[in-house]
């Protein structure tokens, strides 16, 4: 049965630089946008905000939607990734809450695009989408008839 992994990612910009997280994958330091899997009873926006906080310590709402990306990893795992954007007035100090994240870096877009240690090709593709000026309103991904019940995570962002 086909079951793609649904993930979210946050492209965070401040002062012309982009935020990447560094983590060890198969013994190699790799860079990614703050990103992770959608969890049960969670909206896409709530997942993006949670992942941003867990991986960087930054508590913020997303500003816009950049798009949906589809990718099949080398191990044939299919991914559908929802990419969000956040523009900060200035670079913030990061404090990763997730023990899998070694550190965070604020880097010029060109340095990310030239890197050979990206977690996936979606990292560079996300930078290119951002550079092209794609910015969509968040209401495009509002959940339909989201169940509000005790324990459900919900955001009005």
Image (tube, rainbow, N blue to C red):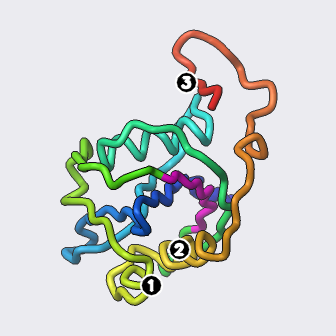
Residue 4 in magenta stretch: no
Q: Which residue is mark 1?
A: 113
Residue beneath the point at 49% across and 49% down? 37
The kind of secondary structure the magenta stretch mainly shows is: strand
Q: Residues within 10 Å of mark 1 (few under 14, many from 20)?
A: some
Q: Is residue 55 left or right of residue 7?
A: left
Secondary structure of residue under mark 3: loop
Q: Is residue 114 left or right of residue 82?
A: left
Mark 3 and mark 2: Cα distance apart in space = 29 Å
Residue 69: percent from left, percent from top: 65, 67
Please tell me which of labels 1 and 3 falls first in the chain.
1
Residue 143: percent from left, percent from top: 74, 34
Residue 19: percent from left, percent from top: 37, 62
Q: Residues within 10 Å of mark 3 (few under 14, many from 20)?
A: some
Q: Which residue is mark 2?
A: 127
* Foreground label between 3 and 2: 2
Please tell me which of labels 3 and 2 falls first in the chain.
2
Q: Is residue 52 above or below residue 155?
A: below
Q: Are marks 1 and 2 in contact (CB under 8 Å)?
A: yes
Q: Nearer the viewer, residue 139 or 39?
A: 139
Q: Is residue 8 left or right of residue 119?
A: right
Q: Are marks 1 and 3 in contact (CB under 8 Å)?
A: no
* Foreground label between 1 and 3: 1
Q: Which residue is mark 3?
A: 153
Secondary structure of residue under mark 2: helix
Residue 81 in magenta stretch: yes
Q: Which residues are magenta?
A: 78-87
Q: Nearer the viewer, residue 100 or 94?
A: 94
Residue beneath the point at 57% across and 32% down? 42
Q: Quadrant of the N terminus?
A: bottom right
Total numbered badges shown on the rendered structure: 3
Residue beneath the point at 50% across and 60% down? 11
């Amino acid at each position: 049965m086909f079951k793609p992994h649904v993930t979210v990612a946050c492209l965070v910009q401040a002062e012309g630089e982009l935020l990447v997280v560094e983590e060890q994958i198969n013994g190699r330091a790799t860079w990614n946008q703050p990103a992770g899997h959608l969890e049960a009873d969670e909206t896409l926006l709530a997942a993006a905000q949670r992942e941003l906080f867990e991986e960087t310590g930054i508590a913020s709402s997303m500003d816009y939607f950049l798009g949906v990306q589809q990718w099949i990893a080398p191990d044939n795992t299919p991914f559908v990734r929802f990419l969000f954007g956040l523009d900060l007035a200035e670079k913030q100090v990061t404090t990763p809450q997730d023990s899998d994240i070694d550190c965070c870096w604020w880097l010029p877009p060109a340095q990310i695009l030239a890197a050979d240690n990206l977690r996936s090709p979606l990292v560079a593709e996300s930078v290119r989408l951002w550079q092209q000026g794609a910015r969509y309103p968040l209401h495009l991904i509002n959940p339909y008839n989201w169940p509000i019940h005790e324990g459900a995570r919900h955001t009005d962002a």
